[in-house]
Image: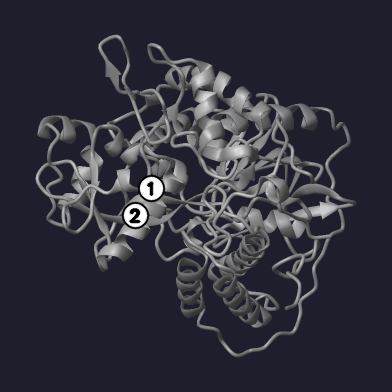
Amino acid sequence: MPDVPRYLVPFHPKRVPHFFTDVLIIGGGLAGLRAALAVKPELSVVVITKDSVLQSNSHYAQGGVAAALGEGDRFENHVEDTLVAGGTLCDRAVVERVVREAPRRIGELIDYGVRFDRAADRLALGREGGHSHARIAHAMGDATGKEIIRAVVERVEHLPNVELWEHTFTLDLLTRDGVCRGALVWNGRHGKTAIWAKQTILATGGAGQLYRETTNPEVATGDGMALAYRAGAELRDLEFVQFHPTVLYIAGGSRHLISEATRGEGAWLVDRHGRRFMTDYDPRGELAPRDVVSLAIVSQMEKTRHTNVYLDMTHIDPQRVRSRFPGIAAVCAEFGLDITKDRIPVRPGAHYMMGGVTVDLEGRSTLPGLWAAGEVTSTGLHGANRLASNSLLEALVYGAHAGEGASAAAEDIHDSFHAPEIENPRVETASEPLNMADIGNSLKSLMWRDVGVRREAETLTDALENIEHWSRYVQVRQFAEPPGWELQNMLCIARLMIEAALARQESRGAHIRTDFPTLDEDRWRRHICFCRM
């Protein structure tokens, strides 16, 4: 297949408007917003979001933020739980740092005005799969992300040095002499604009929309990972995709996350016959880590020849269920389900990327001038499988450090702003129109079928051949609008994910190879990395 082009669209410095800022932040979820708050007030900041600032995985997060705050809980417990879930691909130094910063970062959110749920005079703490203690700080029952983003957005909007550009698509990072100089962006009002920045922070989130079954909003198309790859930054661990075990499954209905916290509150998983089955697969039952529960559900669906299993909360006090999970209750009610009386049909769905842009402890990528934070990154915190509610925590910690680091680096650059002469010529491509929706739907179905909870060489090879075939006539085109650019980004990341999944000949965390069912520490205790030279 042809290599991924360096830039997606044609542009010339004399034919696009130019904008200059000290720090450019691409992505308006929690990681990007926290980074903006960390930049020194005397520096100018632009935050770019593809949709509205409320369209991010952070906004839709239900569970909460994990921190060792409860009675009898210690940092060491949280560290150990994270290492057990993620395996030996976790970076212990990263885990230690993130876990120890957790209480301070939650304290910052409270200072910003986040209204966490409380029990008397202290935070109410929930428990989720893989956690040895109740340590999940949550808000509005099951709408933690919504409440956090509300408070953080309000704070960012009051900063005089920060501009927020919504409904703006980031096409590519601009590089010169091996350094990131900013980004080329597009919106429907102004067209293409070159934003030149002393330092750039990538916080674009994940790639769940690569899969037919996913909890992610429509914006999660892997754009940040793709544009970082095209610019020459290293990506790693792309084979590790976390499938959330419990996604509402009603044929014809949109998919909705059913929080892990339901099982922390005592919900059962039962099959079509009403039988609890999790202890057949793991002694921790419903509170096993997500990779274990997802695989168990898929196996039980096959055994019972049924399209889903069920989450059962009918044995829990109804008042407690309604007060703890008002959002889930409302969503299920739209489909005629009363969660206090009815079992909820669920099955796994793509939820979170453990892999992404390689960064160090401070959030630096391998490309000078580029930092990254949040789900777009591979920090070493999650290893092969993320522990529940560590993602918002990671966004807070790395958003803060990336913002501080980029701020200090931008302050050290005393050269006056200028626009390097970077251009990309127009190329002649086929004029035959493409049905991009059809290709996109085919891609999602392919990824769900062949690169899902379970993988094997034959189906992965078939998937790669399909991706390469589509790429031959999609990647060579220069599209004029976001649907084409998103499709190119999705094909780019899908190919790398499949190559990584084929290469890793073992089963580890969220990567399960039926043809290599065991863990192989001797050969595969290492990262699979990609870098476009």
Crowding around mark 2 (Cα neighbors within 10 Å: few <14, some 14 to 19, many 20+) is many
Q: Nearer the viewer, residue 194 or 496?
A: 496
Relative vertical location of residue 48 with respect to residue 92 in this rendering, above or below:
below
Relative vertical location of residue 23 with respect to residue 190 in this rendering, above or below:
above
User: Would residue 400 be found to the left or right of residue 267 on screen?
Assistant: right
Q: Residue at horizontal 84%, vertical 28%?
A: 412
User: Would residue 292 be found to the left or right of residue 190 on screen?
Assistant: left
Q: CA distance from mark 2 to mark 1?
A: 6 Å
- Amino acid at the residue labelled 2: Ile
Q: Residue at horizontal 45%, vertical 30%?
A: 154
Q: Residue at horizontal 17%, vertical 41%?
A: 313
If the image is split into quadrants, where does the N terminus sit? bottom right
Do we see residue 489 in this rendering? yes
Q: Residue at horizontal 12%, vertical 49%?
A: 342
Q: Nearer the viewer, residue 495 or 503?
A: 503
The picture quadrant where one finds residue 201 is top right
Residue 490: assigned label: none
Point out residue 224 in the picture as x, y percentages from the top left corner: 63, 53
Residue 293: assigned label: 1
In this figure, which residue is indicated by the disc labeled 2? 297
Q: Nearer the viewer, residue 342 or 9?
A: 342
- Amino acid at the residue labelled 1: Val
Do we see residue 193 in this rendering? no
Point out residue 366 in the picture as x, y percentages from the top left corner: 79, 44
Helix, strand or loop status at disc 2: helix
